[in-house]
Image (cartoon, rainbow, N blue to C red):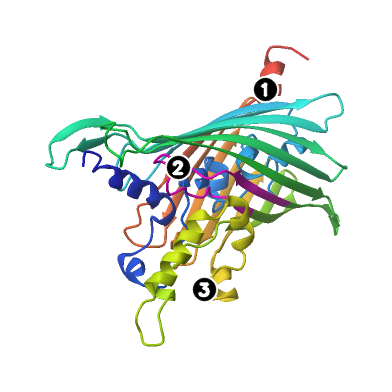
Amino acid sequence: MKIISKFSILACAALVMTATAKADDIKNESFNPITTGVTSLAITPDARGASMGDLGVATDPDVNSQFWNPSKYAFSYSNAGVSLSYTPWLRKIVNDIFLANLTGYMKLGSGDNQAVSASMRYFSLGEISTSDAGGAAMASINPFEMAVDLGYSRKLSEKFSMGVALRYIYSDLGYGGDTNNNDQTKGASAFAADISGYYTTYPVIGRNECQWSLGSNISNVGSKVSYNSGNDPAFLPTNLRLGTAFTFPLADYHNLTVSVDANKLLVPAKPRQANYLTPEGAYDYEAYSEALQNWKDKSSISGIFDSFHDAPGGMSEELKEINYSIGAEYSYNQQFFLRGGYFHEDKTKGNRQYFGFGAGFSMNVIRLDASYMIATAQQSPLDQTLRFTLSFDMDGIKNMFGRK
């Protein structure tokens, strides 16, 4: 078999979502993370959201709202913006995996109530050497995943907006090799859509005018992906994210924002052989094979509804599928920012648990943000992950050149 390296590629991609799982956890029959294709779509692209524990569905609008909640663009303070983010990924394992993300938006019309947005993300798995069955080197390949999307958002009232985004996804994790080889891999394409909402209000507490926001985003609702001519299709990482953010003025020019996000993959759990034990203590392989085939044949839309009630352990197991993030951001005059947060995932669903820290500095035109991740699990490949985001305010650029 000439595509022996294919398994290494797919295993590396799986590390995106289960990178902190311990060997003992994986051997444990209770370990059952939700499996999807194109897992790189779930990686936080921007430094601001990452530094607060991977959250952002209800925070103030910024250039990178396309990933978190496109409907926030309708409430953006600037008429247009562009940002570029870069994340070296899993650097404790290899040194050539990275995520690059380009995002931009622009307000439309004179009513300041609608906007269009777009983003392009590119996830590179680096260079991988392939070999034949005898171990002889064949060639080097560069597997990657990418997504391009276009969004539209609009205010439906002074306090509420909604947004949609359409996305094209391409994932190429291997190469075809010999055309006579039936086990060859091919690039997979898919289409998906997001729908989001954002509500913000300004309650007065004491003598202070605060800001309270709620956000929601259902992302990556779309077709399945398959790397081998339609066989064994994989679900996209369809996700439901809900969150809230509260901003309180500490003093003149000093603000503190506290945010909480919760998200759940809207993907059915893969059947486990351990759940098909007979009263005699033997495995019912026929029932397990049937359940596995039904899971493979399930449509993505049916999978969304089934994801709320398919866990073998009932409601307690369903609750374990919910990840949560809590974070805070301090800002001085909207020019200097300090951030921190925590992300938690149940140990049976991937065991990603880490703290995020970061800072940002903004001028009239340019804003630079950086974040740093510290994993709670020892030897986690996610530990010490850095992210950098450079943003440009197009209104500021216009003002620099004296254009109105």
**Vertically, is 255 above or below 362?**
below
Q: Name the residue under label 3.
A: 312
Neighbor class of circle 3 (other Cα within 10 Å; few <14, some 14-19, many 20+) is: few
Q: Do the residues labelled 1 and 2 touch (CB within 8 Å)?
A: no
**Vertically, is 197 above or below 394?**
below
Which disc, if any, is residue 201?
Answer: none
Q: Mark 2 points at which residue?
A: 230
Discs 1/3, front: 3
Q: Position of residue 297 (x, y in %)?
A: 51, 54
Provide the residue span drawn in magenta: 215-240
Label 3, secondary structure: give it. Answer: loop
Type of the residue with mark 3 = Pro
Discs 1/2, front: 2
Q: Mark 1 points at which residue?
A: 394
Secondary structure mainly formed by the magenta segment? loop
Q: Position of residue 106 (x, y in %)?
A: 71, 26
Neighbor class of circle 2 (other Cα within 10 Å; few <14, some 14-19, many 20+) is: few
Q: In which quarter of the image is residue 160?
A: top right
